Amino acid sequence: MAQIFHRSANTLARASILGVVLLLSAVGAALMEFQRSPYVTAQHIAPEQPVPFSHQHHAAGLGLDCRYCHTSVEDSSFAGIPPTKTCMNCHAQIWTNAPMLAPVRYSFSSGQSLQWTRVHDLPDFVYFNHSIHVNKGVGCYSCHGQVDAMPLMYEENTLQMEWCLNCHREPEKFLRPKEKVFDMRYQQPSIAHAVEVDGKSYTSQFELGKALRQKYHLRTSQDITSCSTCHR
């Protein structure tokens, strides 16, 4: 029987199979990068809000402590959104007629809450507890970034699972003394800048982190990276 296909068809078939494999790999890699992109994560994008609240002005400029507005951050899973009355504690006396604050004044007089757009919004299948992290020495900066330098609030980190796991696997890299949790200007220890805890000075973040992990009774890395820790 005469040969139907030329011998070169074997090479063409192999090249086609290789091309399909490479194409699928490229598409998979592109989708993974897309999943991490700001288009999906909204990282570094400040959403529109009913009032252009500036953390830079209030936290850095006026020196307000995070807990003045986020009152439940140490005791609850939620940091808490301040009621309009908290805003009016000051703005009943200053900037009383500013057009920018008209929604705040209307909210206070009508009793209707301002509809803020949530910036750090985890999926419903993820359990996150602010109080646990705060009381274990994880600073606001570790998750939210340099908030006191943000004229408008945006998401500094992706908040995706791989990002969370980087900290859960090696929490020593991020732990700080509890009294420094809300300090946006806190510096990790170095030879030029020692951090003192319980009368002992540390010039290495790893050594400080190990000491704080023991002091604050953090669970093992295997425990805090188990699926049930965040997915309940």
Image: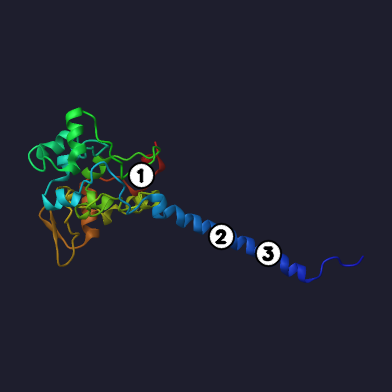
Q: Is 186 located above or below residue 82 in the figure?
A: below
- Residue 133 on image: x %, y %: 26, 44
Amino acid type at mark 2 = Ser
Dot 1 surroundings within 10 Å: few (below 14), some, or many (20 or more)? few
Q: Mark 2 or mark 3: name the one nearer the start of the chain.
A: 3
For residue 12, side relative to residue 87 (left or right) = right
Which residue is nearer to you in this view: 6 or 61? 61
In the picture as drawn, the residue positioned furthest to the right comes out as 1
Say few, some or many: other residues with alpha carbon within 10 Å of mark 2 (under 14 / 14 to 19 / 20 or more): few
Which of the marked residues, 1 or 2, is nearer the chain's N terminus? 2
- Residue 25 is labelled as 2
- Disc 3 versus disc 1: distance between alpha carbons? 46 Å
Tell me the kind of residue under disc 3.
Ser
* SS under mark 2: helix
> Which residue is tagged 1?
223
| Numbered mark located on residue 131 in the image | none
Q: Residue at 20% across / 56% down in the picture?
A: 208
Most distant residue in the left direction: 93
Q: Quadrant of the C terminus?
A: top left
231 over 209 or under it: above or below: above
Provide the secondary structure element on which disc 3 rests: helix
- Residue 184 point in image, percent of width and height: 18, 53
Mark 1 touches mark 2? (CB < 8 Å): no
Say which of marks 3 and 1 sits in front: 3
Q: Give the vertical position of 95 relative to 85 (above or below).
A: below
Residue carrying label 3: 16
Number of residues whose C-alpha sits closer than 10 Å to that of mark 3, classed few (under 14), some (14–19) or many (20 or more): few
Q: CA distance from mark 1 to mark 2?
A: 34 Å
Q: CA distance from mark 2 to mark 3?
A: 14 Å
